Image (cartoon, helix red, strand yellow):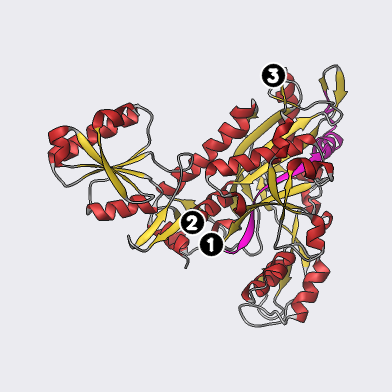
């Protein structure tokens, strides 16, 4: 068990779901600390991609009838490669078996390449390397496509076949025309939502990296592909933003076997070279990069991977995966996809409903650029990148910033003394009334309480002690470096 996993279980960050009845892979509950951090990520996403850009938010249903996913293409195309043991019938995601094989050999180049191999090449790797069933050592079958959607029957007699949504996007596409028409909006228009999605993963693993039930933060940007200028929230986009440099892994680099590397390019260069299909896509790359910086990710830990043509989703004419370095490998936390008019046109075809709108006296079916974050993956990679071992203190320190910390302050009465407790509660209530998020704890030694604050990402811990009763000052401790100073209560109450 890694330090991160150990901390998550000890400190109320994560709880394995259904633990009373034995764990089921791919399902996790968030404890009090975990949900507090996750809520901060969600709130900052809203500030950045919804409120900050003048976009809209909706909440659509989790279950949809089969015909929705016939139209979207998920029923026939939403698959992963699966192999089965010929002896014990255990199932595995075959590309992950190859990836793990090379990770154990410390061959990161081939491990990265395994993520994007076609079925035939995966099977050749399994045969060449003698990869067997992890349970019984039996021989594995050839790879076959496995549909990841979870099915359900709707109605008392199961008369309607339904599925739990594999992405939140389809609800937005189906509601788009009514939202656009009822609000009298103009293009480009972004509509986003935060919600649950479900994928019947063959081999859930690495905790929140590959789950069966997870949360997405998705934004669908509807726009006119023929528009001469790009305006966001009524203002032309400042294209000087495209001079920002990104770490880029191109399709060509991957095809030449350099999947574990990247080169620095400006967003403008990516646009001019055709890696980025349009200016709206370029703008979304810029917004994603700065969003990640604000959360506290370092530039050298972030790269943008151009998705190979052979692995493009069925709806996409161009994809970037934003990946974060996580324990020695890069993990996808977000994707930007140019979905063109694929979804709206397919829903128009299958439903018979005209999905076109009038924009600037022009009738059109808009194109779409999608920005899709995996909230759980973002949460988990942030935790991993901000957890540090402090040998002097003897415990880990989770160094979260103001955008991501679960609480603004921890408040600790030094001892179980009624006067100290009353003073601490008074301070807590004043700070709460000022909109601060407060963690209050009065049991345990002060050292153990400091350790809890350090390990759960609470940067500032306030200790109310006997000097507080004399001069109205408190000790405030910074978890980043364990330094302490005294401040007047009045100063804190004004914060």
Which residues are drawn in magenta?
Answer: 328-357
Element at label 2? loop
Which is more N-terminal, label 2 or label 3?
2
Element at label 1? loop
Give the labeled residue for mark 1: 24
Give the labeled residue for mark 3: 183
Give the labeled residue for mark 2: 17
Residues under numbered marks 2 and 1 in contact, where contact means CB atoms less than 8 Å apart: yes
Residue at (55% x, 56% y) in the render:
208
Residue 394, image x, y percentages: 33, 63
Q: Residues within 10 Å of mark 2 (few under 14, many from 20)?
A: some
Q: CA distance from mark 3 to mark 1?
A: 44 Å
Which is more N-terminal, label 1 or label 2?
2
Query: Which of the two marks, 3 or 1, is nearer to us in this view?
Result: 3
Q: Which mark is residue 450?
A: none
| Res. 142 visible in picture | no
In front of the other: 93 or 445: 445
């Amino acid at each position: 068990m890694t330090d991160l996993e150990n901390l998550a279980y000890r400190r109320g960050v994560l709880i394995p779901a259904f633990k009373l009845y034995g764990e089921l892979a791919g399902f996790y509950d968030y404890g009090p600390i975990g949900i507090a951090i996750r809520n901060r990520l969600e709130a900052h996403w809203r500030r950045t991609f919804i409120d900050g850009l003048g976009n809209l938010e909706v909440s659509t249903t989790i279950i949809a009838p089969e015909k929705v996913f016939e139209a979207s293409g998920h029923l026939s195309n939403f698959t992963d490669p699966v192999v089965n043991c010929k002896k014990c019938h255990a199932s595995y995601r075959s590309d992950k078996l190859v990836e793990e094989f090379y990770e154990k050999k410390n061959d990161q180049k081939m491990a990265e390449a395994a993520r994007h191999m076609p079925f035939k090449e995966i099977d050749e790797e399994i045969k060449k390397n003698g990869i067997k069933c992890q349970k019984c050592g039996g021989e594995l079958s050839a790879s076959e496509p496995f549909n990841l959607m979870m099915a359900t029957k709707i109605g008392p007699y199961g008369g309607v076949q339904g599925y739990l949504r594999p992405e939140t996007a389809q609800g937005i596409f189906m509601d788009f025309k009514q939202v656009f028409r009822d609000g009298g909006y103009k293009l480009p228009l972004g509509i986003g939502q935060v919600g649950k999605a479900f994928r019947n993963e063959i081999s859930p693993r690495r905790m929140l990296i590959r789950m069966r039930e997870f949360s997405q933060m998705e934004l669908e940007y509807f726009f006119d592909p023929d528009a001469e200028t790009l305006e966001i929230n009524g203002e032309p986009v400042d294209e000087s933003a495209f001079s920002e440099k990104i770490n880029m892994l191109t399709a060509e680099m991957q095809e030449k076997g350099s999947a574990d590397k990247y080169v620095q390019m400006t967003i403008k260069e990516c646009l001019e070279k055709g890696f980025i299909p349009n200016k709206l896509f370029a703008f979304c790359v810029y917004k994603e990069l700065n969003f990640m910086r604000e959360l506290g990710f370092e530039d050298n830990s972030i790269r943008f991977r151009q998705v190979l043509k052979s692995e493009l989703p069925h709806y996409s004419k161009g994809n970037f995966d934003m990946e974060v370095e996580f324990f020695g490998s890069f993990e996808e936390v977000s994707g930007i996809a140019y979905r063109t008019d694929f979804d709206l046109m397919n829903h128009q075809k299958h439903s018979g409903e005209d999905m076109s709108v009038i924009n600037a006296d022009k009738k059109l079916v808009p194109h779409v650029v999608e920005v899709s974050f995996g909230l759980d993956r973002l949460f988990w990679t942030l935790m991993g990148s901000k957890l540090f071992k402090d040998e002097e203190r003897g415990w880990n320190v989770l160094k979260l910033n103001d955008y991501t910390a679960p609480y603004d302050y921890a408040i600790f009465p030094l001892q179980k003394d009624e006067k100290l407790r009353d003073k601490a509660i008074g301070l807590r209530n004043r700070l709460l009334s000022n909109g601060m998020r407060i963690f209050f704890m009065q049991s345990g030694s002060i050292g153990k309480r400091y350790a809890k604050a350090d390990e759960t990402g609470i940067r500032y811990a306030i200790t109310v002690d006997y000097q507080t009763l004399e001069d109205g000052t408190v000790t405030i401790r910074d978890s980043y470096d364990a330094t302490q100073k005294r401040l007047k209560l009045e100063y804190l109450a004004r914060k």
